[in-house]
Image: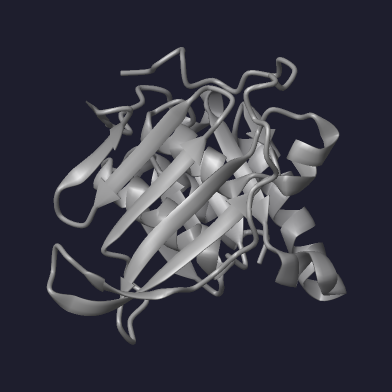
Amino acid sequence: MQTSTGRLNAASATSSATRTPTTPSTPRSRAETTGRESSGSSTPDGTNNFASGIPSFSTAVAALPEGGTDPLVSAIYEPVPDALYLARRGEGATVNGDPLSADSELSLDRGTVSLVVGLPAIRDPDRAATAQRIERSLREQSKRVIQTWSPTVDFGLLARGAIEGLVYVHPQGHEQYAGALLASESGVVSGERDDVYVGASNPETLTAIRSAVATAT
Protein backbone atom coordinates (compact mmCIF):
# COMPACT_ATOMS: atom_id res chain seq x y z
CA MET A 1 0.00 0.00 0.00
CA GLN A 2 1.29 3.47 -0.84
CA THR A 3 2.27 5.49 2.22
CA SER A 4 1.93 9.27 2.13
CA THR A 5 4.29 9.90 5.05
CA GLY A 6 7.28 8.63 3.12
CA ARG A 7 7.12 11.24 0.33
CA LEU A 8 10.07 13.60 0.24
CA ASN A 9 9.47 16.63 2.41
CA ALA A 10 11.16 19.80 1.17
CA ALA A 11 10.66 21.73 4.39
CA SER A 12 13.63 23.55 5.84
CA ALA A 13 16.02 21.73 8.14
CA THR A 14 15.21 21.91 11.82
CA SER A 15 17.56 22.78 14.63
CA SER A 16 17.38 19.25 16.06
CA ALA A 17 20.45 18.27 14.01
CA THR A 18 23.13 20.02 16.03
CA ARG A 19 26.23 18.13 14.90
CA THR A 20 27.79 17.42 11.57
CA PRO A 21 27.94 13.61 11.04
CA THR A 22 31.28 12.01 11.73
CA THR A 23 33.70 10.81 9.07
CA PRO A 24 33.48 7.26 7.65
CA SER A 25 35.16 4.51 9.62
CA THR A 26 35.59 0.74 9.46
CA PRO A 27 36.13 -0.58 13.01
CA ARG A 28 36.60 -4.30 13.68
CA SER A 29 34.42 -6.08 16.24
CA ARG A 30 32.83 -9.43 17.06
CA ALA A 31 29.21 -9.71 15.93
CA GLU A 32 27.33 -10.81 19.05
CA THR A 33 24.39 -12.19 17.09
CA THR A 34 26.54 -14.52 14.97
CA GLY A 35 29.59 -15.24 17.10
CA ARG A 36 31.79 -14.51 14.06
CA GLU A 37 34.43 -11.89 13.46
CA SER A 38 32.94 -8.93 11.61
CA SER A 39 33.91 -5.57 10.21
CA GLY A 40 31.87 -2.42 10.82
CA SER A 41 31.14 0.21 8.18
CA SER A 42 29.78 3.65 9.10
CA THR A 43 29.34 6.79 7.06
CA PRO A 44 27.62 10.17 7.11
CA ASP A 45 25.35 10.64 4.12
CA GLY A 46 24.08 13.87 2.58
CA THR A 47 26.74 16.09 4.11
CA ASN A 48 26.40 18.61 1.26
CA ASN A 49 22.69 18.80 2.01
CA PHE A 50 23.42 19.27 5.71
CA ALA A 51 25.83 22.12 5.00
CA SER A 52 23.27 23.79 2.74
CA GLY A 53 20.37 23.43 5.17
CA ILE A 54 18.58 20.86 3.00
CA PRO A 55 16.74 18.35 5.26
CA SER A 56 17.92 15.18 3.54
CA PHE A 57 20.85 13.57 5.37
CA SER A 58 21.57 10.63 7.64
CA THR A 59 24.16 8.45 9.31
CA ALA A 60 24.41 4.80 8.31
CA VAL A 61 26.20 1.81 9.85
CA ALA A 62 26.48 -1.83 8.83
CA ALA A 63 28.20 -4.95 10.15
CA LEU A 64 29.89 -7.17 7.55
CA PRO A 65 31.17 -10.72 8.01
CA GLU A 66 34.94 -10.86 8.14
CA GLY A 67 36.21 -10.93 4.56
CA GLY A 68 32.70 -10.56 3.11
CA THR A 69 30.55 -7.84 1.60
CA ASP A 70 27.05 -9.05 2.48
CA PRO A 71 25.99 -7.06 5.56
CA LEU A 72 24.59 -8.88 8.58
CA VAL A 73 22.83 -5.91 10.19
CA SER A 74 22.44 -2.25 9.31
CA ALA A 75 21.02 0.94 10.77
CA ILE A 76 20.20 4.29 9.17
CA TYR A 77 19.23 7.32 11.24
CA GLU A 78 17.62 10.46 9.80
CA PRO A 79 17.72 13.26 12.41
CA VAL A 80 15.17 15.63 10.84
CA PRO A 81 12.17 13.22 10.86
CA ASP A 82 13.73 11.32 13.79
CA ALA A 83 13.53 8.07 11.81
CA LEU A 84 15.63 5.05 12.78
CA TYR A 85 15.74 2.22 10.24
CA LEU A 86 17.03 -1.18 11.37
CA ALA A 87 17.57 -4.32 9.30
CA ARG A 88 18.90 -7.76 10.18
CA ARG A 89 19.61 -10.33 7.48
CA GLY A 90 16.79 -12.86 7.33
CA GLU A 91 14.75 -11.13 10.04
CA GLY A 92 13.16 -8.17 8.30
CA ALA A 93 13.40 -4.41 8.73
CA THR A 94 11.74 -1.74 10.86
CA VAL A 95 11.47 2.03 11.14
CA ASN A 96 11.12 3.31 14.71
CA GLY A 97 10.12 -0.22 15.70
CA ASP A 98 7.36 -0.65 13.10
CA PRO A 99 7.75 -3.36 10.43
CA LEU A 100 8.63 -2.10 6.96
CA SER A 101 7.12 -3.15 3.65
CA ALA A 102 8.12 -1.82 0.24
CA ASP A 103 4.65 -2.42 -1.21
CA SER A 104 3.48 0.11 -3.79
CA GLU A 105 0.49 -0.19 -6.08
CA LEU A 106 1.78 2.37 -8.60
CA SER A 107 3.18 1.31 -11.96
CA LEU A 108 6.39 2.90 -13.22
CA ASP A 109 4.62 5.37 -15.50
CA ARG A 110 2.78 6.73 -12.44
CA GLY A 111 5.64 6.29 -10.00
CA THR A 112 8.75 7.97 -8.66
CA VAL A 113 12.30 6.70 -9.10
CA SER A 114 15.38 7.90 -7.23
CA LEU A 115 18.55 8.23 -9.28
CA VAL A 116 21.81 8.14 -7.33
CA VAL A 117 25.11 8.79 -9.12
CA GLY A 118 28.18 7.63 -7.20
CA LEU A 119 31.45 9.56 -7.14
CA PRO A 120 33.16 7.23 -9.65
CA ALA A 121 30.51 8.23 -12.21
CA ILE A 122 30.57 11.92 -11.31
CA ARG A 123 34.35 12.15 -11.71
CA ASP A 124 34.66 10.17 -14.94
CA PRO A 125 33.33 11.87 -18.12
CA ASP A 126 32.29 8.62 -19.84
CA ARG A 127 30.52 7.29 -16.76
CA ALA A 128 28.88 10.69 -16.20
CA ALA A 129 27.57 10.62 -19.76
CA THR A 130 26.11 7.15 -19.15
CA ALA A 131 24.41 8.41 -15.97
CA GLN A 132 22.88 11.28 -17.92
CA ARG A 133 21.51 8.87 -20.53
CA ILE A 134 20.05 6.71 -17.76
CA GLU A 135 18.37 9.77 -16.25
CA ARG A 136 16.80 10.73 -19.59
CA SER A 137 15.54 7.19 -20.11
CA LEU A 138 14.05 7.02 -16.62
CA ARG A 139 12.29 10.37 -17.10
CA GLU A 140 10.69 9.05 -20.28
CA GLN A 141 9.37 5.94 -18.50
CA SER A 142 8.36 7.26 -15.05
CA LYS A 143 6.28 10.08 -13.65
CA ARG A 144 9.16 11.60 -11.71
CA VAL A 145 12.87 11.14 -11.10
CA ILE A 146 14.35 12.56 -7.89
CA GLN A 147 17.97 13.15 -6.93
CA THR A 148 18.39 13.94 -3.25
CA TRP A 149 22.18 13.50 -2.94
CA SER A 150 21.51 11.25 0.04
CA PRO A 151 21.41 7.58 -1.03
CA THR A 152 20.55 6.06 2.34
CA VAL A 153 17.61 8.44 2.72
CA ASP A 154 16.39 7.22 -0.67
CA PHE A 155 16.81 3.60 0.40
CA GLY A 156 14.56 4.42 3.35
CA LEU A 157 11.92 5.87 1.02
CA LEU A 158 12.08 2.74 -1.12
CA ALA A 159 11.89 0.44 1.90
CA ARG A 160 8.69 2.08 3.16
CA GLY A 161 6.99 2.10 -0.25
CA ALA A 162 7.17 5.87 -0.67
CA ILE A 163 8.94 5.61 -4.03
CA GLU A 164 8.66 2.86 -6.60
CA GLY A 165 12.30 2.38 -7.57
CA LEU A 166 15.93 3.31 -7.04
CA VAL A 167 18.79 3.30 -9.53
CA TYR A 168 22.33 3.65 -8.13
CA VAL A 169 25.02 4.18 -10.76
CA HIS A 170 28.44 3.03 -9.49
CA PRO A 171 27.41 2.49 -5.85
CA GLN A 172 29.74 3.40 -3.00
CA GLY A 173 30.34 0.65 -0.46
CA HIS A 174 29.50 2.37 2.83
CA GLU A 175 26.12 3.65 1.62
CA GLN A 176 25.32 0.53 -0.36
CA TYR A 177 25.94 -1.88 2.52
CA ALA A 178 23.40 -0.28 4.84
CA GLY A 179 20.85 0.70 2.21
CA ALA A 180 20.73 -2.51 0.19
CA LEU A 181 20.18 -4.68 3.27
CA LEU A 182 17.38 -2.38 4.46
CA ALA A 183 15.79 -2.61 1.03
CA SER A 184 16.01 -6.38 0.68
CA GLU A 185 14.69 -7.03 4.19
CA SER A 186 11.67 -4.80 3.49
CA GLY A 187 10.76 -6.80 0.39
CA VAL A 188 12.47 -4.78 -2.34
CA VAL A 189 13.39 -6.82 -5.41
CA SER A 190 16.73 -5.84 -6.93
CA GLY A 191 19.54 -6.66 -9.28
CA GLU A 192 22.96 -5.25 -10.13
CA ARG A 193 24.75 -5.28 -13.47
CA ASP A 194 27.68 -3.30 -14.85
CA ASP A 195 27.98 -1.35 -11.60
CA VAL A 196 24.35 -0.23 -11.69
CA TYR A 197 22.07 -1.27 -8.80
CA VAL A 198 18.34 -1.32 -9.50
CA GLY A 199 15.76 -1.83 -6.75
CA ALA A 200 11.99 -1.75 -7.06
CA SER A 201 8.81 -2.33 -5.09
CA ASN A 202 7.73 -5.31 -7.22
CA PRO A 203 9.04 -7.56 -10.02
CA GLU A 204 7.07 -5.79 -12.77
CA THR A 205 8.51 -2.40 -11.86
CA LEU A 206 11.99 -3.88 -11.56
CA THR A 207 11.73 -5.26 -15.10
CA ALA A 208 10.51 -1.91 -16.43
CA ILE A 209 13.30 0.05 -14.74
CA ARG A 210 16.00 -2.39 -15.85
CA SER A 211 14.71 -2.09 -19.41
CA ALA A 212 14.94 1.70 -19.20
CA VAL A 213 18.49 1.44 -17.87
CA ALA A 214 19.49 -1.08 -20.55
CA THR A 215 18.46 1.25 -23.35
CA ALA A 216 20.84 3.88 -21.99
CA THR A 217 23.94 1.72 -21.38
Residue 72 placement (x, y as % from top left)? 26, 64
Q: Is residue 4 left or right of residue 58?
A: left
User: Going 30% across and 29% down the picture, which residue do you hit?
Assistant: 103
User: Going 59% across and 25% down the picture, which residue do you hit?
Assistant: 80
> Residue 30, relative to residue 213: is it above or below?
below
Name the quarter where the N terminus is drawn: top left
User: Going 63% across and 39% down the picture, which residue do you hit?
Assistant: 57
Residue located farthest toward the bottom when viewing the structure as drawn: 67
What's the coloring here?
Answer: one colour
Residue 113 placement (x, y as % from top left)? 57, 37
Residue 30 placement (x, y as % from top left)? 24, 74
> Quadrant of residue 69 in the image?
bottom left
Q: Nearer the viewer, residue 104 or 123?
A: 123
Residue 61 placement (x, y as % from top left)? 44, 56
> Residue 50, relative to residue 75: is it above or below?
above
Q: Nearer the viewer, residue 47 or 173?
A: 47
